[in-house]
Amino acid sequence: MASAAYGEIDALRVIYGLKRIYRHNSVGDRKESTAEHTFSSLVLADFLLDRYDFKVDKERVFELVLYHDLVEVHADDTPLRPGVDRSGKGERENAAFKRLLTELPSRLAVRYNDLYIEFESQKTREARLARAVEQLDAEIHELDYKRDWKGWTEGFLRENKEKCFRGFPELREIFEEHVRYIRENGYFDVK
């Protein structure tokens, strides 16, 4: 007979599904998994939180970054790309969130519930920083894959990402440096 702890650990396998969800972003000759995005976002958050005093609860930022894309296990990734229809994204993710609450071990489900609501509402400084970090991560990652910028314009990038850096001048400066690099190196001109 399996122990209660084993049953809870077995229930975590749903989270491992993030390894099978592929984003539009390239990694060599394949696509990046959501798990890889989560990992690099955590590393970026750790770096930035060590470098700047954002006056936030660091552990909470780490938790928000760690769990923010968990809904993709059931909702899949909806990429931010020119020409991609993102309608229904919120509904799909909300349904996936509710499903996950029934699949996760109970104590983790309670914590995940709080984290998901906090991240989605963007009412706390920690949630806004977590979103800024995960948006910056995708931008940094794609600097190695110029072909993935096909169809992007500076206007589209600014319209969809610039708002994430409000309240964080240090990140806004990094964003502006990346935009300048992207413009000067022809990323917006990829055909």
Image (cartoon, helix red, strand yellow):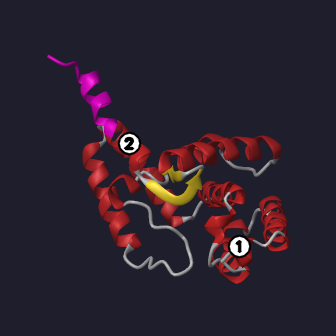
- Disc 1 marks which amino acid? Glu
> Over which residues does the magenta segment extend?
1-13
Residue 97 is situated, as x and y percent measured from the top left of the image, at 34, 57
Determine the residue located farthest toward the left in the rendered image: 1
Q: Is residue 47 left or right of residue 65?
A: right
Instruction: Please report the residue visible at 68 percent of the width from the left and 46 percent of the height from the top.
Output: 45
Q: Main secondary structure of the magenta part?
A: helix
Q: Amino acid at mark 2?
A: Ile
* Residue 4 magenta: yes
User: Residue at label 1?
Assistant: 162
CA separation, marks 2 and 1? 30 Å
Dot 2: what SS?
A: helix
State the image quarter where residue 141 is shown: bottom right
Does 89 sit above or below residue 23?
Answer: below
Residue at the spot of label 2: 15
Labels 2 and 1: the sequence-earlier one: 2
Q: Which part of the image, by quadrant, shows the C terminus? A: bottom right
Residue sitting at 58 percent across and 50 percent down?
27
Residue 170 picture quarter: bottom right
| Residue furthest top in the image | 1
| Residue 25 in sight in this render | yes
Tell me the crowding category of disc 2: few under 14, some 14 to 19, or many 20 or more residues within 10 angstroms, Cα based.
some
Is 54 drawn above or below residue 59 in the view shown?
A: below
